[in-house]
Amino acid sequence: MHRSKAWLFIAGSLLCLAGQVQAKDVIVEIYKKKFIPSEITIEAGDRVIWKNIEKRQYHNVWFKGSGEEEPDYFFPDESYERTFDKLGSFAYECGPHPKMKGLVIVKKTEQ
């Protein structure tokens, strides 16, 4: 490739990357039968990772109100993750411990 063409290709690639917003990972810890934090606000495309840091207790993250089936449990030192592409508010709970509740609010990606 000719040098000037290579330079234009690199410059164009960098401009494309500059216009993209990087998705983020957001961590929710599970400890003492609580989601910490219990409410989070993220941008579309972000991934939420729920980490079980209990010593002996199993949990799950169930978006029951959306009609989903109850997911599998995950145990201490395990995690569950989900990427949110749709805008809105998504309430969830722990199936085996229904008093544990959380909320994910997904807003439009800011550029």
Image (spheres, rainbow, N blue to C red):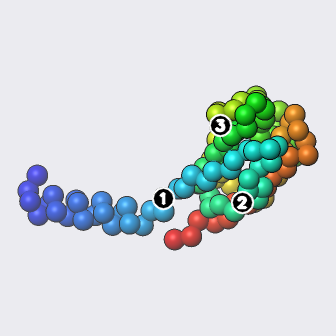
Check disc 2: other Cα within 10 Å, few if <14, some if 14-19, many if 20+. Answer: some
Residue pictured at 82% horizontal, 43% vertical: 33
Residue 22, which numbered label?
1
User: Which numbered dot is residue 40?
Assistant: 2
Q: Residues within 10 Å of mark 1 (few under 14, many from 20)?
A: few
What amino acid type should be assigned to the residue bearing mark 3? Ser
Q: Nearer the viewer, residue 4 or 46?
A: 46
Spot occupied by residue 71 in the image (x, y as percentages of width and height)? 77, 32
Residue lying furthest right? 99
Q: Secondary structure at mark 1?
A: loop
Per the model, the C-alpha gap separating discs 2 and 3 is: 17 Å
Residue 7: x and y in percent read 16, 62
With respect to residue 60, does 7 lie above or below?
A: below
Report which quarter residue 54 is drawn in: top right
- Comes first in the chain, label 2 or label 1: 1
Q: From the viewer's perspective, is residue 96 above or below residue 40? A: above
- The amino acid type of the residue labelled 1 equals Gln
The alpha-carbon separation of the residues under discs 2 and 1 comes to 18 Å
Res 4 quadrant in image: bottom left
37 up-or-down from 76: above or below: below
> Label 3, on which residue?
79
The residue located at (77%, 49%) in the rendering is 35
Q: Position of residue 85 (x, y in %)?
A: 64, 53
* Residue 62 visible in image: yes
Point out residue 84 in the picture as x, y percentages from the top left corner. 65, 51
SS for dot 3:
strand
Near-viewer residue (54 or 14): 54
Whether residue 92 is visible = no
Left or right: 88, with 14 as reference point? right
**Amino acid of disc 2:** Ile
**Which element is circle 2 on?**
strand
Q: How many marks?
A: 3
